[in-house]
Amino acid sequence: MTTRKEIKEAKKADLKRALELDPAATSEWQIKHTYAGYKALCGYRKAHWYWERGHKKIAEMISYRYRQKTNVEIHPGATIGKGIFIDHGAGIVIGETAVVGDNCIIYQGVTLGGTGKQSGKRHPTLGEDVQVSAGAKVLGAITIGEHSKIGANSVVIKDVPPYSTVVGVPGRVVKSYGKRIADMDQVLLPDPIMDEFRRIHKSIEDLCAKVGIEDNTYSITQEEYITSEFDQEGNDYNVKSI
């Protein structure tokens, strides 16, 4: 069971993480009194202490109170590590059997939810140092490997290996040759759909060249065609559906 000392240490780690990652954070006082995500985590840790000891009604009432205050719903039965940063927080839902590893980052609108009415483990497990970007949905009893990154508005329903980036609906893993994806960037993500358009476009272009057709109208711009072909370091993307 979680001890009060462990709760105190976890809250300190959450506070430190927010100061490190949020450029808008100027002081511990500001985070403690104005950050909904930090307040929601504090409320969860209190509720979880009661939940583990069998006082589930008290835990549920505490959880409900903090949901009203913060617009963040964290079930008191969830298992959440330390050093967690919930940015903005609005609309986040974390289910009863969800597991969140240390040093994870969760943005507004994220759901760590189930897929049906089954009992037992039915919510996702996030490894350490996972980032789940705004609006993403991670559903079912799946595992997101450590140091992975879920792109904004992605819907992930299958396991994700460590050090991966997932984008799209349904989510697709984009390998980066074992290199860790840059922290805290929700925008500069690979685009597997554009990569597929690029591949098809290249095939059509080659066919036109073979039959002597010079006027080939582009369905994507030349700029998109070039920039979608390589990542920022000049490497081809390796895209795999999951």
Image (tube, rainbow, N blue to C red):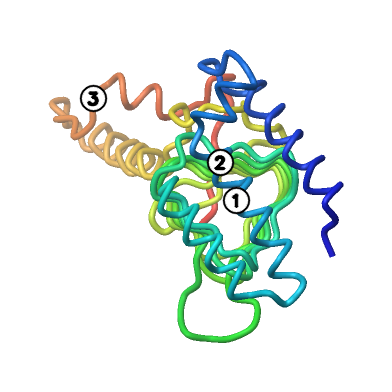
The quadrant of the image that shows the C terminus is: bottom right
Marks 1 and 2 close (CB-CB < 8 Å) = yes
Q: Residue at x 47, y 85 (%)?
A: 117
In the structure shown, which secondary structural element does the residue marked by tag 3 occupy?
A: loop
Q: Residue at x 23, y 36 (%)?
A: 208
Give the residue type that dot 1 points to.
Gly
Query: In the displayed structure, does residue 66 sit left or right of residue 17?
Result: left
Query: In the displayed structure, does residue 16 sit left or right of residue 191?
Result: right
Query: In the displayed structure, does residue 83 sit left or right of residue 36?
Result: right
Question: Which quadrant would residue 17 be assigned to in this image?
Answer: top right
Q: Residue at x 60, y 39 (%)?
A: 105
Q: Residues within 10 Å of mark 1 (few under 14, many from 20)?
A: many
The quadrant of the image that shows the N terminus is: bottom right
Which label belongs to residue 39?
A: 2
Can you see residue 2? yes
Q: Mark 1 highlights which residue?
A: 43
Give the residue type that dot 3 points to.
Thr
- Cα–Cα gap, marks 1 and 2: 6 Å
* 222 in relation to 17, above or below: above
* Viewer-side label of 1, 3: 1
Which label belongs to residue 84?
A: none
In the structure shown, which secondary structural element does the residue marked by tag 1 occupy?
A: helix
Q: Residues within 10 Å of mark 2 (few under 14, many from 20)?
A: many
Q: Mark 3 highlights which residue?
A: 221
Q: x, y (%) of residue 95?
A: 54, 66
Can you see residue 171? no
Marks 3 and 2 close (CB-CB < 8 Å) = no
Q: x, y (%) of residue 122?
A: 59, 75
* Viewer-side label of 3, 2: 2
Q: x, y (%) of residue 86?
A: 55, 39
